[in-house]
Image: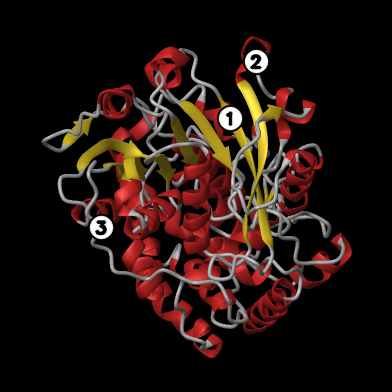
Amino acid sequence: MPFHRNRGVGAAVAVTTVMTAGLLSATPAHAAPEIDWIPCPEEILAQVPPAEQDLFTCAYFVAPLDHADPDAGEAGTTLVRRQATEPEGSQGSLMVNLGGPGMSGVIVPIAMSGLLGEEVLAQYDLIGFDPRGMTLDCFGSPEERERVLSDLTSLPTTAEQERLTLAAFDEYGQACADSSALAPHVSTENIARDLDLMRAALGEERLNFVGMSYGSMIASVYANLYPETTGSLVLDSPVDAALRVTRPLEYDRQRAQGFEDALDELLAQCDEAGAECAFGDGDPRTRFDEVRDGLQENGSVLLEDGEAVTRASLTTKVGDTLQGSPVFGGDTPGDVLAWLQRVSEALEAPTEAPADATTDASEQPAAAGAGGFSFYNDDAFYSINCADRGYPATPRHVTRTAQKWETTMPTFGRSQAFEQYAACSQWPDSEAPAYRGPWVASVDVPPLVLVHEHDAATPVSFAERTADRFPGAGSVRVEGFGHVVLGSNSCAGAVITDYLVNGEVPGEDVSCASEAPVFG
């Protein structure tokens, strides 16, 4: 996902601070892991419908900072639980991760109330958790953060922008490495090991887990570390775990191609829809290329509502729409096509943008989570990814890679090259263990793998390879666009419910028709 400067870091850390302030006193030393559930702080309960507030409790769980050296320190994490509505028939705990990395788990049980079937909510305690890293704050002050990150550009297109972006990422990485004792100990493997301690503390023999997007990475690592305690796994829009950590540049290239393919399909459907599509006058594919190239040539264009649009903000807005989901909200494909029409019209009759206009959507304030909480932490995003993924330490090659990818993936190739390679090629080495295989877990309960046909962020090929690594895995493919199936389709929802409630793994691949029309 594109870099969003300052996106949610302070707010996400503040939310965790609010949680921990009221929970630390109830937490025992790590020597005897257990979970002491207490009433949630008002800041959390305020986001919950009054009729459901009695279902929610919170806790603070302590794990070793270094799992190989349990006496080296502690790493704490916040938990939020929504209890099963029919506890007499409870199947135990269902832990959920929204993705990221860098997404808070504080809102998970609240958000899932409207996305999982009633039978699931009746039979499972939903557990949301903040993966280690959510408390990272790499800078001593907002001013210092702004000083360093103001030089970052989500889509560097000039030599000076490229130089400044690479230099800023270099300073960013050093700031994170020096920020706290936790910083060198964040990785997906450590999160998975934390998760197993939570499972045991919850009294569960097996881990039941819903992992969306990067959350599937946590699940895959867990299943390979602890196959004997792996229970039901719902892998929604999964990453290709093996490719992600062993060949990160190829993973990024395929991801960029996934965005290009989804955009091609959206523009083709717009062409077929004709007048039903707001951007359907003429050839939408040609028109889009003209808009993108026109923004590169002109720098920016001002819309009638005062929004200044650049090539970078176009890339971010279209990309965010293609990877949208009911979990996170945002524009629909139809919305972004109507917006493209406005941008096209503005380019035909341009108005000069004021000097102080904000031109990069990636620098806009974060989209808030439940009840207005920002729940994304970029410091965790980069620290975890750079620990996990074996990028070559060759920042000098980032620009060349961007140029190469841009020739065949003109909309998303350049931005994808700079998204993580620019940071991780020069991020300080981490002390955290990084699981990179093998990926041959033999689990008793085959996972359920779901994906949209035109998922841009995690293409269908990622889901296919994920399912192939788990013999007997069930597969569900949903027509249409979007990233994360959960909550978007009743057909897929019924399969998820049957899997979690009855243990039914589909014997054949399931195809579900789209229930979200692009036009109209």
Q: CA distance from mark 1 to mark 3?
A: 29 Å
Residue plotted at (72% across, 39% down): 305
Q: Quadrant of the C terminus?
A: top left
Query: From where the camera sits, is residue 479 visible?
Result: yes
How dense is the environment of label 3, judged by Cα within 10 Å: few (below 14), some, or many (20 and up)? many
Q: Residue 406: x and y, percent? A: 43, 73
Quarter holding residue 466:
bottom left
Count up the numbered dots: 3
Residue picked out by circle 2: 54
The answer to the question of whether label 2 and label 3 lie on touching residues, with beta carbons closer than 8 A, is no
Q: Is residue 203 left or right of residue 243?
A: right
Which numbered disc flags the more N-terminal residue, 2 or 3? 2
Q: Residue 311: x and y, percent? A: 58, 61
Which numbered disc flags the more N-terminal residue, 1 or 3? 1
**Amino acid, disc 2:** Asp
Q: Is residue 491 left or right of residue 321?
A: left
**Amino acid, disc 3:** Ala
The answer to the question of whether label 2 and label 1 lie on touching residues, with beta carbons closer than 8 A, is no
Q: How is the image coloured?
A: secondary structure
Q: CA distance from mark 2 to mark 1?
A: 11 Å
Residue picked out by circle 3: 441
Q: Which secondary structure, mark 2?
A: helix
Residue plotted at (64% across, 58% down): 133
